[in-house]
């Protein structure tokens, strides 16, 4: 099976840049995708593939990948970016989706 | 506009059964692979099951294998999850989500879930 590891919590000052990371062996072969989830709401896709944003996602969100680590960067964090962020990819041994444990982002 | 609307959640006793549904609209449902993802209260996301567009390929998480059955009816644009032998640890919000793939360069095609429903709460308790 495959595991994706995320820091449980990260904080950032309003308007500053924050990077949320995701580590896992499968990320050497498969891109991560990133999901934002606010309390009481369903997750929404914010980044997929090399660095692709779905329509409607602000360009302050970007993604990158190196080795076994994928990163989600928010450049100029806004108060509305406070949420949980989950990375996801493919299980390296089976054709399954696997999620990281999530990172709670606090905007100070 | 793509929409996924889950229904069928509720309170069920341990050992009981429940079927949740997901109604899809705004896209050609029969062309897409679909997934169920769940989230226990205060916890993270957990992938539950996958079904290919034709229903030919199905996968389950080890935690639900042998108890849950995923199915779809492309004529009705609907996805289902039949849950049997329910346990307290199955208590969660269940989301349906549309699956796509992206790959480029040296990276193999990776799955991503581009649209999610609002979820339906399943509570297993006596």
Image (cartoon, rainbow, N blue to C red):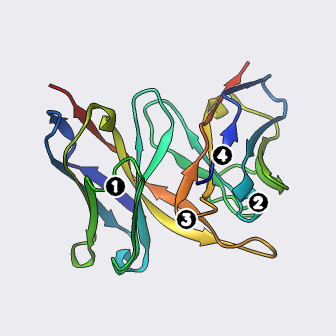
Q: Position of residue A64 (x, y in %)?
A: 81, 54
Secondary element at image label 4: loop
Are both tags, 1 and 3, on one chain? Answer: no
Marks 3/4: CA–CA distance: 14 Å
Marks 1/3: CA–CA distance: 15 Å
Q: Tell me which numbered mark, 3 or 4, is placed earlier along the sequence.
A: 4
Q: Position of residue A100 (x, y in %)?
A: 61, 43
The residue located at (58%, 54%) in the rendering is: A1
Judging from the image, mark 1 belongs to the subunit labelled B
Q: Quadrant of the C terminus of chain A?
A: top right
| Mark 2 Cα shell of 10 Å, populated few (<14), some (14-19), many (≥20) | some
For residue A94, which numbered disc appears in the image?
Answer: 3
| Mark 4 Cα shell of 10 Å, populated few (<14), some (14-19), many (≥20) | many
Are both tags, 3 and 4, on one chain? Answer: yes
Q: Are marks 2 and 4 in contact (CB under 8 Å)?
A: no
Marks 2/4: CA–CA distance: 19 Å
Are both tags, 3 and 2, on one chain? Answer: yes
**Residue A51 versus residue B13: which sits nearer the camera?**
B13
Judging from the image, mark 4 belongs to the subunit labelled A
Secondary element at image label 2: loop
Q: Position of residue B64 (x, y in %)?
A: 34, 50
**Residue A7 versus residue B116: which sits nearer the camera?**
A7
For residue B65, which numbered disc appears in the image?
Answer: 1
Secondary element at image label 1: loop
| Mark 3 Cα shell of 10 Å, populated few (<14), some (14-19), many (≥20) | few
For residue A4, which numbered disc appears in the image?
Answer: 4
Question: In the image, which is nearer the foreground, mark 4 or mark 1?
Answer: 1
Left or right: A43, with B101 as reference point: left
**Residue A92 versus residue B35: which sits nearer the camera?**
A92
């Amino acid at each position: 099976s495959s595991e994706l590891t995320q820091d449980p919590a990260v904080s950032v000052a309003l308007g500053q840049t924050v990077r949320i990371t995701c580590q896992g062996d499968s990320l050497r072969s498969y891109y991560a995708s990133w999901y934002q989830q606010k309390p009481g709401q369903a997750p929404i896709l914010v980044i997929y593939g090399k660095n692709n944003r779905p329509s409607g996602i602000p360009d302050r969100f970007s993604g990158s990948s190196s080795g076994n680590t994928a990163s989600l960067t928010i450049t100029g964090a806004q108060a509305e970016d406070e949420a949980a962020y989950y990375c996801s990819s493919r299980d390296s041994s089976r054709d399954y989706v696997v999620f990281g444990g999530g990172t709670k982002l606090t905007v100070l | 506009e793509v929409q996924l609307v889950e229904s069928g959640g509720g309170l069920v006793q341990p050992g009981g059964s429940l079927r949740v549904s997901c109604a899809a609209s705004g896209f050609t449902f029969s062309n897409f692979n679909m997934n169920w993802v769940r989230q226990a209260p205060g916890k993270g996301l957990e992938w539950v099951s996958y079904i290919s567009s034709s229903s030919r390929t199905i996968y389950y998480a080890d935690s639900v294998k042998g108890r849950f059955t995923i199915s779809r009816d492309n004529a009705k644009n609907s996805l289902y999850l039949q849950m049997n032998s329910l346990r307290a640890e199955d208590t969660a919000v269940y989301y349906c989500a549309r699956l796509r793939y992206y790959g480029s360069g040296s990276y193999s095609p990776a799955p991503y879930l581009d649209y999610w429903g609002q979820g339906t709460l399943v509570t297993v308790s006596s």
